[in-house]
Amino acid sequence: MASLKDKVPPHNADAEQAALGALLLDWDAVGTAIRFLRPERFYSLQNQKIFAAILGLYNDGIRGDIITLIERLRSNGELDAAGGPAYISTLTDTVATSANIEYYAKIVLDQAVRRDLIKISAAIVANSHDETVDSRAVLEDAQKRIFELTDLNTVQSSASAGELVNEAIVLIEKLYHDKKAFTGIPSGLEGLDKLTSGFHASELIIIGARPSIGKTALALSMVQHIAVDLKIKTAFFSLEMANMQIMMRLLAQESRISSERIRTGYLRREDFTKLQQAAGKIYEAPLYIVDTPNMKLLDLRAMARRLRAQKQVEIIFIDYITLIQSENSLIPRHEQIAEISRSLKSLARELNIPVVVLSQVRRDAENKQPTLADLRESGSIEQDADVVMFIHRERRDKDREQAAEQQGMETELILAKQRNGPTGTVDIVFLPVYTKFENKA
């Protein structure tokens, strides 16, 4: 037989009353309390209404006390629901000082989180018994709810203008002395980083190109710089290439040994020393590769959340958007891509990290510089993206192509859209022998 404790949701009445009493003793403590508390985080309906009234007074710039609080509740028609004057007057009797307001507030928050966990668990059980709902949808919804719940413990803080201006001056001085310092995650391509100042949190970044121009090579060149050189935690979703192929490319890039020699095994003795050194650096890199062909959108979002929560990844690459499978296969493909594009932008905002996605462009862009209109299958990609760049290289005859491969193939990286900065063109070089892009210099 279940005990009464099992039936009553977690709460701490003493902590709720102590928190409210501390605020009535010291109105300045409201600024501390609102970092942790909202009306709905109180278990008692009376306490919810009291704290809501306290917030109302605080937002109106009125210093609260028992008298002003009672008057505010009376004018709102909620005095009786809040326990009446008798209950409100007893709140200050439960606490002697406001010194422990943060401690009380954290207890109230902890109990609120526990109640939310119970609600989420009940919803998961109910959805799991609903045969009309796909199991992956149940799983994704559960992960999303849990992920949102963790944000309750991410306390917001404020800073004075004096503190912020000092930090801004320090940053400006750093940028002045170190021209390679960027506010976002640098791609390793200097011209691009000067235009973008790096890839920033919540941004959806699209890299577009015709087939066989080097979308994956460019993404892996960036991954090699970000994860291997800078040790920034990175996830790479490969929907086209196997994870072993990706690792072979990374080894070629890092060791600067011909990718063909690595693939076929025709290596020189000195190559093994380079390979071992490269393997050592890659081994230590915080890089997580997800190799899943025909990946569903729900599965991709769920895996991204897990990598963010468990591995604290700071940037995600996806190769590439048209290989992501929509859950609704009955709608037209361009509508599926629109749904996927919106979902990836939402994911970048939810996880608060940059999400870099590769995309093909239309075939009629073959003999010209690609533009935003050439993004394949859906105009929503252009609309949802914060940054769009295209890889462009003129096709050459076979002899000139082979000659260029030995020297490096000059390529344009066209920054066609940047929501928060300038656009422009960056000259880079593709080294086919290493399947790697580098700065032209």
Image: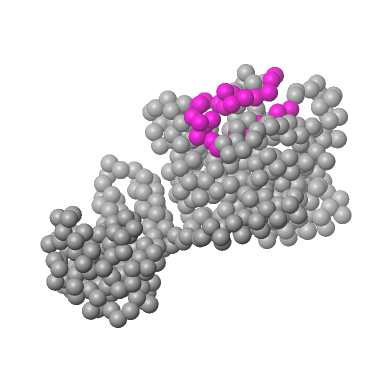
Name the one closer to the observer, 60 or 5.
60
Residue situated furthest bottom in the rendering: 96
- Residue 271 in sight from this viewpoint: yes
Quadrant where the image shows the C terminus: top right
Asked if residue 129 is positioned above or below residue 441 in the image, the reply reads below
48 with respect to 415 (left or right): left
First to last magenta residue range: 367-393
Quadrant the N terminus occupies = bottom left
Horizontal side of residue 195 vs 258, given as left or right:
left
Residue 134, quarter of picture: top left
Name which residue lies at 60% across and 32% down.
Answer: 417
Residue under the image location 46 percent in, 36 percent down: 342
* Coordinates of residue 260 in the picture (x, y in percent): 78, 41
Q: Residue at x 80, y 32 (%)?
A: 409
Report the label total: 0
Residue 155 position by quadrant? bottom left
Residue 32, image x, y percentages: 39, 67
For the point 19% across and 61% down, which residue is it? 71
Asked whether residue 410 is drawn in magenta, I would say: no
Up-down: is 34 above or below 382? below
Relative side of 306 to 167, left or right: left
Coloring applied to the structure: one colour
In the rendered image, is residue 296 in sight? no
Q: Nearer the viewer, residue 418 or 331?
A: 418
The residue closer to the viewer here, 389 or 176, is: 176
List x then y, in percent, for residue 161. 53, 57
Image: 262 above or below 97:
above
Left or right, 177 with respect to 98, comes to right
Residue 379 falls within the magenta-colored stretch: yes
Q: Nearer the viewer, residue 438 or 296?
A: 438
Residue 238 at x, y percent in the picture:
58, 43
Q: Quadrant of residue 114?
A: bottom left
